[in-house]
Image (cartoon, rainbow, N blue to C red):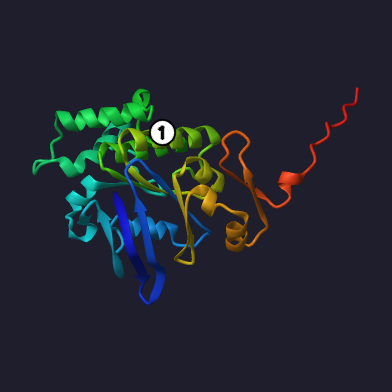
Amino acid sequence: MLEIRNLTVAYGSRVVLQDISLNIMPGQILAVIGPNGAGKSTLVRSVSGVLPVSGGTVMIGTRPLHTLSANQRARCLAVVPQARQLPGAFTVYETILLGRTPYLGWLGKSGSQDHEQAAWALRRTRLTELAGRKVSELSGGEQQRVLLARALAQAAPVLLLDEPTTHLDLQHQAGLLNLLRELALERQLAVLIVLHDLNLAGLYADQVALLVDGRLQALGSPKEVLTSRNLTAVFHVPIDVIPHPAYGTPLVLPDGVANLPARRPLPVSL
């Protein structure tokens, strides 16, 4: 389990996260949403240990994050960052194998278990055919899958993703989030994912955390958080929320779209 207790983060005298408390159970996905500048990426960076915290505690199971060494932390928690930070001269397989770094001995030599885990991550992200390709030759969607595969190779029980669907087309968005949903259940991962797309949060998340100005504005199921009242107040535009016609999840629409009449067919000149 990932447990965030009263987390506060500041840049000098400026507080960017204040008193954030969240729990993510194994097998669950928590989506973090909110306007630009709300502190979503800062939350990922502080929970992963990249940023120091001013107050509060991050717990992984029964262990406080700050008591763990860098290698111990990397065995417990894997991160898929927002910006692509991939070594372009490396092959896809070599890059994924970097996820095994926390398990290597003093000589830094990978063993059979490391290669088995990397091969599994390669298969699960459907990258097997690209294993020998240079990362610099890949499309944006393929690079995003490499980042996910590298994180999966760490075999960590907690997975943090910072806007992994940004710049991906619909096919790759659905593929990545479907895979996360499968792996969360199959491997009992606790997954925290930052999303801009509110409808994706409604479809894939078990819980949604709404951040505004560094504070937790709402926390609960998608139906509890993705409401017209909450979203209109936060994003400062009128928003309608209706049940998704196929899944029953919240469907977020600009105000009035749900009541628009059906479009008439365009006239065809012969």
The residue sitting at 30% across, 51% down in the picture is 2
| Amino acid under disc 1 | Leu
Residue 241: image x %, image y %?
63, 49
Q: Which of these two is toward me, 88 or 46? A: 46
**Residue at image location 23% in from the left, 31% down from the top:** 117
Let me know if residue 139 appears in the view.
Answer: no
**Can you say which quadrant of the picture contains the C terminus?**
top right
Quarter assignment of residue 267: top right
- Residue 206 picture location, percent across and down: 44, 45
Q: Residue furthest bottom?
A: 13
Q: Quadrant of residue 152?
A: top left
Q: Residue furthest right?
A: 270
- Which residue is disc 1 drawn over? 179
Give coordinates of residue 82: x percent, y percent. 41, 49
Q: Can residue 55 be spotted in the picture?
A: yes
Q: Nearer the viewer, residue 140 or 112?
A: 112
**Can you say whether 24 is above or below 230 in the image?**
above
Total number of numbered labels? Answer: 1
Left or right of 176 in this view: 131: left
Task: Tell me if mark 1 has few (under 14), some (14-19) or many (20+) residues whose alpha carbon lies within 10 angstroms of its own.
Answer: few
Q: Position of residue 19 (x, y in %)?
A: 38, 68
Q: In the visual, does 29 lie left or right of 155?
A: right
| Up-down relation of residue 270 to residue 20 (above or below) | above
What secondary structure is marked by label 1?
helix
Residue drawn at 58 percent across, 59 percent down: 230
